[in-house]
Amino acid sequence: MFEQRIEDAIIEVLPVGMQEEALDFANYLRASDMAFERGKVYWENKYYWMIKYESEYVCFVFIGVDEEKDESWTIWSDDSGSKWFEDYPVDNHTKTIAYANVDFCGNCGSCGGGTTKTIFGKKFNNACRTTFRFDNPDSDAVECAKKMVEIRKNDIMNHAV
């Protein structure tokens, strides 16, 4: 059951109304040469993918199939303290969506707690290591998440050895 591709999980788990955005995002990731790696340990038996470019984390996607997140999906950006979102030039519409989806620390225990981050020129306190969290994103939020992937991919390409 858990060897499925992300597209199979989207169709199996999400209601028809959510599938279009999720499939659009998955297709974008594939077209952007991203690698899909299934989650490990806690995430091993869940529909969770670590998305990588050139072996570097770009984002994470969860297709909800447990009691807490049934019929939902989430995109987290990868950041873990980097500065690639700090002053990257984006339009005001993208900033508005990004700011509405900043992932604030929920004291999950995976780190020492939230931190201060500057995101597109604006300072946020108590931000999570994964800068953005898009829960059940609509088409505008998916476009914003795609931009976050593009920014991270550019960062990886610009810092390749």
Image: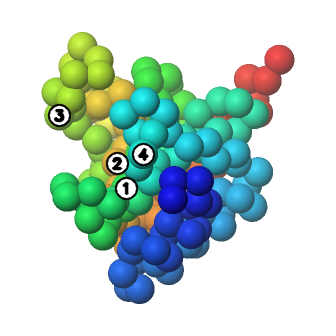
Q: What's under tag 1, amino acid-wise?
A: Thr
- Between marks 3 and 2, how big is the CA–CA gap? 12 Å
Task: Return the mark for residue 16.
Answer: none
Circle 2 SS class: strand
- Between marks 1 and 2, how big is the CA–CA gap? 7 Å
137 relative to 50, above or below: below
State which tag comes first along the sequence, 1 or 3: 1
Q: What's under tag 3, amino acid-wise?
A: Gly
Q: Look at discs 1 and 2 and give the one toward the viewer.
A: 1
State which tag comes first along the sequence, 2 or 4: 4
**Which residue does the numbered mark 4 point to in the structure image?**
45
Residue neighbourhood size for the residue with mark 4, other residues' Cα within 10 Å, grouped as few (<14), some (14–19), many (≥20)? few
Residue neighbourhood size for the residue with mark 2, other residues' Cα within 10 Å, grouped as few (<14), some (14–19), many (≥20)? many
| Residue 91 in view in this figure | no
Q: Is residue 155 left or right of residue 94?
A: right
- Tell me what residue is drawn at x 40 percent, y 71 percent: 13
State which tag comes first along the sequence, 1 or 2: 1
Q: Is residue 117 left or right of residue 92?
A: left
Residue neighbourhood size for the residue with mark 1, other residues' Cα within 10 Å, grouped as few (<14), some (14–19), many (≥20)? some
The front one of 119 and 142 is 142
- Between marks 2 and 4, how big is the CA–CA gap? 21 Å
User: Which corner quadrant holds the C terminus?
Assistant: top right
Q: Is residue 64 left or right of residue 53?
A: left
Q: What's under tag 2, amino acid-wise?
A: Arg
